[in-house]
Amino acid sequence: MIPPDSFIPLAEETNLIRPLSHLIIEQAFKDFVEFLKIIPELILSINMSPKTLDDLLLPDEFSKLAQ
């Protein structure tokens, strides 16, 4: 395993944090759908870098994935 503090700062410095976050969000939703089949009361939480929170496309992406 690679701890987040070893790659998140680099991703933020090189402006790769947004594409990385989008990939992680997409995979998290895909996995969540599968886990819901086993544990219907499961809740999804995703830790986000503060640098991604000003992305105006993020709410739409979350909404599309949630559908």
Image (cartoon, rainbow, N blue to C red):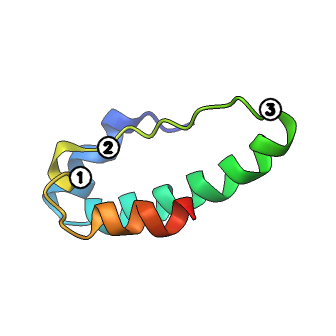
The residue where tag 3 is placed is 39
Specify few, some or many for label 2: CA neighbours under 10 Å numbering under 14, 14-19, or 20 or more.
Answer: few
Q: Quadrant of the N terminus?
A: top right
Disc 2 marks which amino acid? Met
Counting from the top left corner in percent of width and height, residue 63 is at 43, 63
In the displayed structure image, the side of residue 38 where residue 62 appears, left or right: left
Answer whether labels 2 and 3 touch (C-beta < 8 Å).
Answer: no
Q: Nearer the viewer, mark 2 or mark 3?
A: 3
Q: Residue at x 53, y 65 (%)?
A: 65
Instruction: Mark 2 or mark 3: name the one nearer the start of the chain.
Output: 3
Counting from the top left corner in percent of width and height, residue 29 is at 59, 55
Q: Quadrant of the C terminus?
A: bottom right
Mark 1 element type: helix
The residue where tag 2 is placed is 48
Disc 1 marks which amino acid? Leu
- Image disc number at residue 56: none
Q: Residue furthest right?
A: 38
Answer whether labels 3 and 1 touch (C-beta < 8 Å).
Answer: no
Q: Nearer the viewer, mark 2 or mark 1?
A: 2
